[in-house]
Each structure stands twice: as structure tokens, then as C-alpha cells.
Amino acid sequence: MRPLTEKDFKAEAEPVLQQVFTIDNPFAPHPFAKTIPQRRVVFGLEYDLKYTVKSPLIDALVAAASSVGDTGCYFTMLWRMNEEAKGEFNHWYIPFSEISAYKRNDYKIFGFAFNAENVLYSPSGKWGIMTSHEYHGLLGGTQEFMDEVRRRIPNLDEQVYGFLELWQQHKAHNIGAKTDWLPGLLTQIYDEETASEMLRKADLP
């Protein structure tokens, strides 16, 4: 396990993060880098994607990442704290041999990282997953990586419908949740025609 200072992050990790995501916001209309060929919304309360990634999804990600040559991943908080002087960090490199610390939400290592949105991503720029407080994740990667995730999570491509149902409920209950970012997100994942039809069926945005 290796914490990264902001200087380390800028030099070492941010360039590969930007190969997967162009913005650190899970509610942005176009969050994925153009070079990422496969993109999906991950959703399911069993994954507990509010600030963390639980099994079986985390296990699928580690297996898929290993299959494309990664031996670890970066972990970055999207809401940064300026606490390096106190020995607290916003970024880490996690060897897969030590992924159990992430899986058990080890606060002694990661501090408040699990209290806000964050992102796990490849040191080779081949994949990444961004979490949100609305229980969805944005997952992108190479074809080989995503094929392995699908093999282990067979309903991966159907999870978007549960995600849309949640936002349909938000709209129906008039809680003031913004949905204007959904068309851009779905268009970037699929195409404009498919995105429009999905949103029409869900009565969104």
C-alpha cells in the first residue's frame, strides 16, 4: 500500500486517470475519455456503490484487471482534503495483494475516503470505476477488460435499467434531483438514438 501526495498524484496517477475519465463527477454528461471503448453504468444496491465497491463486483474488477496485466490500482477521493500535514492523503496505490484493506474499508489506512465519491482506476489507463452517493458507478475499460467483467457479472449490461428506474422515482417524487445530465451520459455510453429510446421508456429526463 502506498499513499500519494498531491504532487505524486499529479505526476504519476492523474495522467492515467484522465485516460479513463475526463472529469471527476459521476453526474457529468460526458465523463468518459474518448479513448475508452467500452462504457457502462453499474447499479445494484447489493454492490453498495455509495462510496465503495463491494463483492462480487470488486472481485470481478480485480480479476479483469489482472487479465489485462495490472497488478494493482489507484484509489482517489473526488472530494479532496488538504490534510497532508497531518499524515492524511487523498490518493493511494493499492497492490491487488492488499486489496483486502479496501474491501474492509480500512479507516486506519484510508481515513475518510469511504465517506465521499471516489474512483478506482488502472495504472495503465485500461479501466476505471467512479462511485456516487446515488448508488451507481461509471465503469469503463478496454474490450478485453469488460469482456472479463461480463463473464463474472452476467447482468452487467442490464444494470442501467435499475439505475434509470431510480431516477424515474426521483422525478416522480419531485425531490428536485437534476436529470439533465442523463442524455449526455447515455449517449456517450450507447448512441443518441438508443439513449433517446431508453429515456423515453423511462419518462426521463
Image (tube, helix red, strand yellow):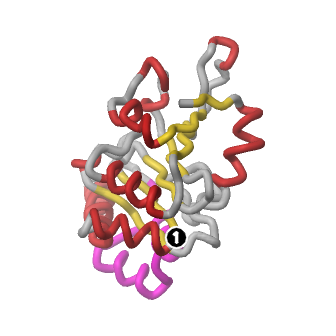
Instruction: State which quadrant residue 200 falls in.
Output: bottom left
Q: Which residue is drawn at the image coordinates 65% and 31% (left, top)? A: 4
Front residue of 136 and 39: 39
Q: Which residue is drawn at the image coordinates 61% and 59% (left, top)? A: 125
Q: Which residue is drawn at the image coordinates 59% and 30% (left, top)? A: 2
Question: Residue 78: image x %, image y %?
Answer: 57, 40
Quadrant of the image containing the C terminus: bottom left
32 displayed left or right of 60: right
Give the residues drawn in magenta, as a range. Answer: 178-205
Residue 151 part of the magenta-drawn span: no
Question: Residue 119: image x %, image y %?
Answer: 51, 46
Numbered-mark total? 1
93 displayed left or right of 204: right
- The amino acid marked with disc number 1 is Thr
Question: Residue 175: image x %, image y %?
Answer: 34, 48
Q: Residue furthest bottom?
A: 193
Label 1 secondary element: loop
Front residue of 139 and 69: 69
Any part of residue 179 in sight = no
Question: Residue 148: image x %, image y %?
Answer: 37, 67
Q: Main secondary structure of the magenta part?
A: helix
